Amino acid sequence: MNDSILQRDHTTVRGRIRYTSKKPERLDEIRGREWYSINTYADGSRTIIVHTEIDDRPSVMRDATYSLDKDWRPTDCFVRLTVDDKFMGSGWFKMADGYVECETHTALEGRVTQRMDTDGWCKSFQNHAIACDAWHLRLFDRSKVGDVQELDELILCSPDHRGATGPMLFKAGMHIKYLGEEKVTVEAGEFDAYHFQMVSAPGLPNPHPDYDIWCTADGEWTFLKGGVAGYMQTWYELVELYDGGE
């Protein structure tokens, strides 16, 4: 029996991601930022609390609280969204075996109730936090280096590339190449990493440019850096990562 008055069975890490532009006329200009805190509980389940700011006009501000079980299956998510410094919407999403559902209120649609069938348990949920982009990558086979692999069911809170609509349920896919292991240095430190590239996202209203992502190879799938090509020409880098328990 533990008689201590204190209980701390979970672990906490905190991080910060910097958003910059790679467009020639804006090269390395800071265009946004993201702060997050991840609590991993004694049973292996986890919750990320993340605040995102995108400065490109119309500006986007998003707060999300997203939870997964010990097997990395999404269980629930709350998203509140501001666009152009005005309320856009807020909503709660729940995942279960065979369906996802949400209750949201948006500036454009008013009160919205949705339920969407899924192929078994929802495999992954896109809340548009960059910190969570790498979490989808656990689903892909790293023995198939260079092959295009398909995830045919990815549930999103918005089909917009910046996540600036809704929030509401939307279903799309994800096509990924695994490009191998690398040693990666970012402002937050040096890490053993996996390198993936998203080559398409079928089902989105507008095609998504290629998106290279590097994440830690330690089983935590921590986002390290990433770059989006095409019309976006953006770059994301982990600049701080530390133990949040103190």
Image (cartoon, rainbow, N blue to C red):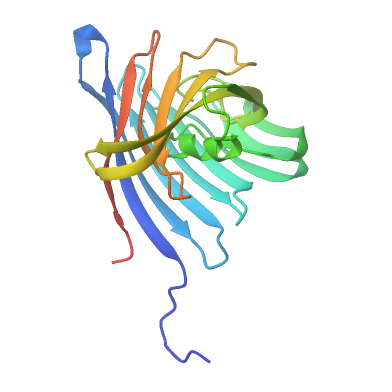
Query: Which quadrant of the figure contains the C terminus?
Result: bottom left
User: Residue 208 appears at what percent x and percent y?
Assistant: 50, 14
Q: Residue 148 sits in which quadrant?
A: top right
31 and 181: which is toward the camera: 181
129 and 145: which is toward the camera: 145
User: Residue 14 appears at what percent x and percent y?
Assistant: 34, 52
Q: Is residue 18 found left or right of 48 in the rendered image?
A: left
User: Residue 27 appears at what percent x and percent y?
Assistant: 20, 15
Above or below — where is 234 with respect to 12? above
Q: Residue 130 sits in which quadrant?
A: top left
- Residue found at x 43% / y 45%: 217
Count of marks, rendered view: 0
Above or below — where is 127 with respect to 198? below
- Residue found at x 63% / y 30%: 154
User: Residue 87 appears at what percent x and percent y?
Assistant: 45, 30
- Residue found at x 67% / y 31%: 112
Q: Is residue 112 found left or right of 186 in the rendered image?
A: right
